[in-house]
Image (spheres, rainbow, N blue to C red):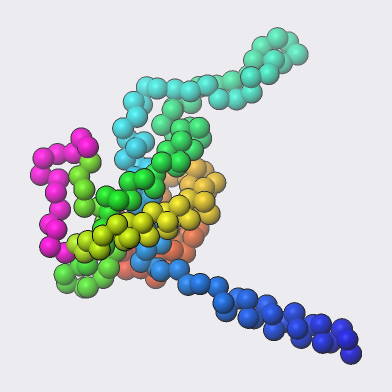
């Protein structure tokens, strides 16, 4: 009898705990995921492709040789880890964008890149600037996504995978699974 009560109690507690978890804002987390991919792609494109880094073990083999190899810096795990540490700092360059035709909401970059072309400014009419708390929410979502998916992000970018938006934000994390803009670039 006592084991039956324990089983029922555990079942009730598990249902209660699973129903009490906070829901994540799909628009916010999907946009944060896509912004991470966009910012990392941009940062990787700014690295000189000729730069390399030594990776491997720095231990000597029994024959006195060392086993290491050179890989391109841009897609090395070391460089990607450094980029991930600062990727969420650029979330203040994003704001909520409402598509005028479909009224779909997503966060998009409104600020031009530091070396961007002169005509790189978007139409600000469809952006909603809600003050610093909106970019703080996006930054928090970005940090959550990076913390949760750091290994997957590094793996995808180090392999130079195709359609990273799709793989990371839809397949691995389900943040953009229901989004109409799953393949759209930021």
Query: Is 22 part of what is drawn in magenta?
Result: no
> Is residue 171 rendered to the left or right of residue 106?
right
Residue 98: x and y, percent? 22, 67
Res. 163 visible in picture: no
The residue located at (64%, 23%) in the rendering is: 57
What is the count of numbered marks?
A: 0
- The magenta stretch is 114-126
Observer-nearest residue: 166 or 15? 15
Residue 115: x and y, percent? 20, 35
Q: Of helix, strand and loop, which mostly describes the magenta segment?
A: loop
Residue 180: x and y, percent? 32, 68
Does 158 sit above or below residue 27? above
Residue 13: x and y, percent? 69, 80
Q: Residue 52 is drawn in which quadrant?
A: top left
> Is residue 102 rendered to the left or right of residue 181?
left
Image quarter of the N terminus: bottom right
């Amino acid at each position: 009898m006592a084991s039956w009560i324990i089983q029922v109690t555990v079942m009730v507690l598990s249902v209660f705990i699973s129903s009490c978890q906070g829901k994540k804002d799909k628009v916010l987390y999907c946009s944060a995921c896509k912004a991470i991919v966009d910012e990392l792609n941009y940062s990787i494109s700014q690295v000189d492709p000729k730069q390399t880094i030594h990776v491997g073990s720095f231990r000597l083999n029994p024959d006195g040789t060392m086993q290491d190899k050179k890989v391109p810096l841009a897609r090395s795990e070391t460089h990607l880890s450094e980029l991930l540490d600062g990727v969420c700092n650029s979330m203040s360059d994003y704001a909520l964008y409402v598509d005028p035709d479909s009224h779909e909401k997503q966060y998009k970059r409104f600020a031009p890149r530091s070396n961007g072309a002169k005509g790189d400014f978007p139409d600000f009419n469809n952006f909603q600037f809600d003050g610093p708390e909106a970019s703080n929410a996006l930054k928090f979502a970005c940090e959550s996504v990076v913390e949760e998916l750091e290994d997957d992000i590094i793996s995808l970018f180090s392999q130079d995978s195709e359609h990273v938006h799709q793989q990371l934000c839809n397949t691995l994390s389900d943040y953009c699974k229901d989004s109409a803009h799953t393949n759209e670039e930021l």
